[in-house]
Amino acid sequence: MEYSVKQAIPGKQPSPCVVVAVHERQQLSPAAAQLDKLSRGYLRTILKRGDIKGKCGQTLLLHDVPWTRCERVLLVGCGKNRGMSPRDFRKVLQQTARTLDRHGVREADCHLLEVDVEDRNLEWKARQAAEVMTATLYRFDLLKRKEDRQPVRLRRVHFDVPEEQARAARKALRQGKAIAQGMTLARDLANLPGNLCTPTHLADEARRLANSDRRFRIQVLDEKRMQRLGMGALLAVARGSRQPPRFIVLEYRGDPGGGAPYVLVGKGITFDSGGISIKPAAAMDEMKYDMSGAASVLGTLAAVSRLALPLNVVGVIPSCENLPDGNATKPGDIVTSMSGQTIEILNTDAEGRLILCDALTYSERFKPRAVIDIATLTGACVIALGKHYSGLLGNDETLLKQLGEAGETSCDRPWRLPLGEEYQEQLKSNFADIANVGGREAGTITAACFLARFTENYPWAHLDIAGTAWLSGPHKGATGRPVPLLVQFLLDRAAEAAPQS
């Protein structure tokens, strides 16, 4: 998809399709009113007939509108003629992209950025337009026969923007497209089946990304190097698989001044059977998505590279499979983590925290400004928050607040959960320093409490994306979240650093 900015009076220049907003009570947006005037009241006649009510997300495609130079005109319902919610604006963009593509429109002139959105400016609307329209038209058909693939037909969208705001709008469109491309990478990786997306494949993808930008530096640790580092928790998870584990470290150096980096740690379980504590068979195929945290880290770094952010960012991805085998870790086994703490593994299906704890310990060597781990960690988070919010916990109030603000801006919101010391009691073990599970109660919180034991030396936040990383049912597939949240967080940090530099 290509996006551009132009200044045009709708209907006066040749156009394959012009997109304008209509509101409830037969009210026209400014661009729609101009088009109606040029067509001598044609649009108002359509509205009076009741073909479209103006409700949010409704669409109506018109052909050969008289006295205009448009091949087609798409009317898009935008609700009441006052500030619409950000959520409704995104819904309008989704419906617009779907309608244009479904009808084979390859190029369109869009006037939807003039719609008023609550507490949002033109730059936000432009960025959302590029991000949402690209994400809406995403297809994963790499493994289908050519004749069964559904290519995206919509190729170009031009947005009508006042000349004095054109430069800011172009920048916002670039940001939105970069975020969408990062989401596409994350979705492609997560949607691949476990027999193709192995730990080695993730490492190869990280290398490809590193080769695309000289600001990247990559290091991939194999099993022997992990053993030398004492990553006993991570290696305990990998024991039941024939696929070798990989520990991926991808550094982006965008700050020549050598500022302390932000470290993103992504859980990379490329398939999770639960190990000896095996999962039920129903929907186990979806456990290919257990590497969505790793995918989101790579997607975020891809966007950071495209945006050339003046920050140092490190992606750390511990990756392996969790499978049952004669050599697999058993419930009751005790292992020693890289930090030196011993862990009693009471449930082998609580494996994400085991690979993350060694990665969090490893992250200390970067003397990070902050560390954020991203993981499809607990089913309890799905029960608590559903598919709408990611869980958010951590040890630093400033960092948690910044992530919350980034979530509001990006419409990729996390929900703060408590991380009280009293929950640590549930992780006590009679035989080791800590148990890897804390019972049924507050499962999302006790999982984060486990990770907190390994993050005492730096600001840290944990994003549990078990409910938001993918959708089930007829729309099954990866969502690309929380790439928008993470990129917005880094954009905000870059903006803060700009006056100092």
Image: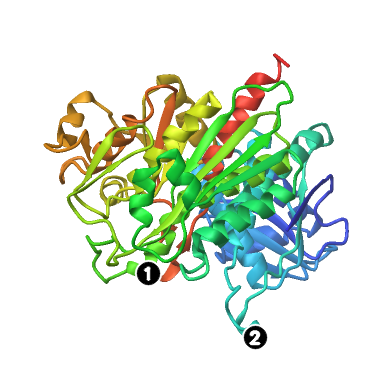
- How far separated are the C-alphas under marks 1 and 2? 25 Å
Q: Is residue 486 above or below residue 183?
A: above
Whole-percent x and y of residue 349?
A: 27, 55
- Residue occupied by mark 2: 147
Front tag of 1 and 2:
1
Between 322 and 388, the residue placed more toward the observer is 322
Q: Residue at x 73, y 38 (%)?
A: 215
Query: Label 2's element?
Result: helix
Mark 2 belongs to which amino acid?
Glu
Vertical side of 192 occupied by 486: above or below = above
User: The residue under label 1 is which amino acid type?
Assistant: Asp
Which circle's residue, 1 or 2, is located before the other in the chain? 2
Percent of width and height locating residue 272: 35, 61
* Image mark for residue 24: none
Q: Position of residue 501 (x, y in %)?
A: 73, 16
Res 449 → quadrant: top left
| Quadrant the N terminus occupies | bottom right
Residue appearing at x 65%, y 59% in the figure: 75
- Most foreground residue, 300 or 389: 300
Residue drawn 15% across and 44% down? 439
In this picture, residue 438 sits left or right of residue 215: left
Q: Determine whether, in the image, residue 436 is placed left or right of residue 212.
A: left
State the residue in front, 397 or 365.
365
Residue that numbered label 1 is attached to: 285
